[in-house]
Image (cartoon, rainbow, N blue to C red):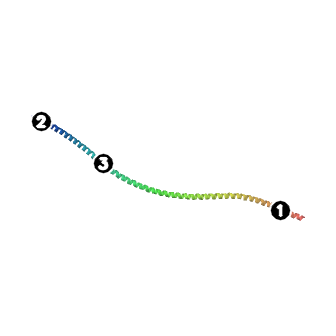
Amino acid sequence: MSALGAEVAGLRARVAETGDSVQALLAERLAGEKDLEQSLREHERLRRHRETIELELGQVGVEGDATRDLRGRLDRRITAARDAEALHEASMNRLRAGIEEAQEAEARLVGDLTGCRIELASARERVEALGRELGRLDQMERDFTERIAQARGRRAQLEERRAWLGEERDRT
């Protein structure tokens, strides 16, 4: 019995060890299952993340196409704006040339106008001088008319004296 008791005690110790071993295996199994669940959750998260990235990649592709299309339209608008600006610049250059020609013509006309004003002022001065000269000539005409009248009066007196002298001579 003692051998049997020892064997039972050995078996009990072995059962305790086996229980500990089963407990350890169960703990390992539980840890493995938890790791497996964690791996499955991580795999599912990665799958969803991959789907999200693929979806975003598609959206980025669509946005890239839209951006390329927008850039093409903008390039065409910029080209049209450059062409319009070149036409506008050419038009402005023509207008500037016209303005410069008009300014040169205006300068010539102002010079001509100044010359005409000077000539007009000179002509006015001559007219005024001639007016004064006419006044003097009129005065001279009046003086000459008066002198001629005086000379006729003297001539008449002279004729009368000659006639009187002729009579006096005849009488003497």
Q: Nearer the viewer, residue 96 or 129?
A: 96
Check contact, mark 3 vs mark 1: CB within 8 A. no
Which of the two marks, 3 or 1, is nearer to us in this view?
3
Q: Secondary structure at mark 1?
A: helix
Q: Nearer the viewer, residue 172 or 123?
A: 123
Return the mark for residue 53: 3
Q: Secondary structure at mark 2?
A: helix
Of callouts 3 and 1, which one flags the residue occurring earlier in the amino acid sequence?
3
Tell me the kind of residue under disc 1. Answer: Leu
10 Å crowding of disc 3: few (<14), some (14-19), many (20+): few
Tell me the kind of residue under disc 2. Answer: Ala
Return the mark for residue 6: 2
On the image, the x and y values in percent for residue 66 come to 35, 52
Left or right of residue 53, residue 15 in this image: left
Return the mark for residue 158: 1
Q: Nearer the viewer, residue 32 or 87?
A: 32
> What's the CA distance linking mark 3 and mark 2?
67 Å
Left or right of residue 100, residue 165 in this image: right
Tell me the kind of residue under disc 3. Answer: Ile
- Rendering quarter of residue 6: top left
